Image (cartoon, rainbow, N blue to C red):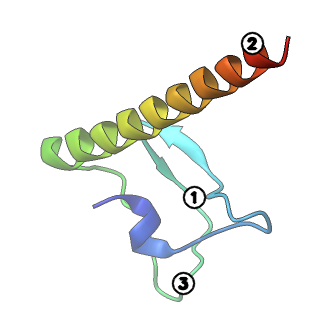
Amino acid sequence: MSHHSDCGCKNHHGHHHGRHHGGHKHCGCFCKPGYMPRRYYTKEEIIQQLEEYLKQLQAEAKGVEERIAELKKET
């Protein structure tokens, strides 16, 4: 479970705001009444978060490759 699902905190552009701390993000904004951001995550949670991050990076890389191929066809 990531922090994103815990607090639901988003800024105006829909991106989670905060800082990285020990391999994860937390907002520190106390956005829900009584909400205290977690300071420690289990090893399994960190692995899950890193695997999700890797999927996002791989999707981004695929998009970059597709864009490069499009640009090469235009020239």
Disc 2 target residue? 72
Residue positioned 57% across, 60% down in the render: 28
Figure disc tally: 3
Where does label 1 land, which residue?
Answer: 27
Q: Position of residue 35 (x, y in %)?
A: 46, 78
Dots 1 and 3: beta carbons under 8 Å?
Answer: no
In this view, the mark in front (3 or 2): 2
| Disc 1 packing (10 Å; few <14; some 14–19; many ≥20) | many
Q: Amino acid at mark 2?
A: Lys
Residue at the image position 57 percent from the left and 73 percent from the top: 30
Q: Residue at x 69, y 18 (%)?
A: 68
Q: CA distance from mark 1 to mark 3?
A: 11 Å
Between residue 38 and residue 68, name the one nearer to us. 68
In the picture as drawn, the residue positioned furthest to the left comes out as 44
Q: Which residue is mark 3?
A: 32
Residues at marks 3 and 2, CA–CA distance in whole angstroms: 49 Å
As rendered, which of 41 and 69 lies closer to the eye? Answer: 69
* N-terminal-most mark, 1 or 3: 1
Labels 3 and 2: the sequence-earlier one: 3
Tag 3: residue type? Lys
Q: Is residue 28 left or right of residue 40?
A: right
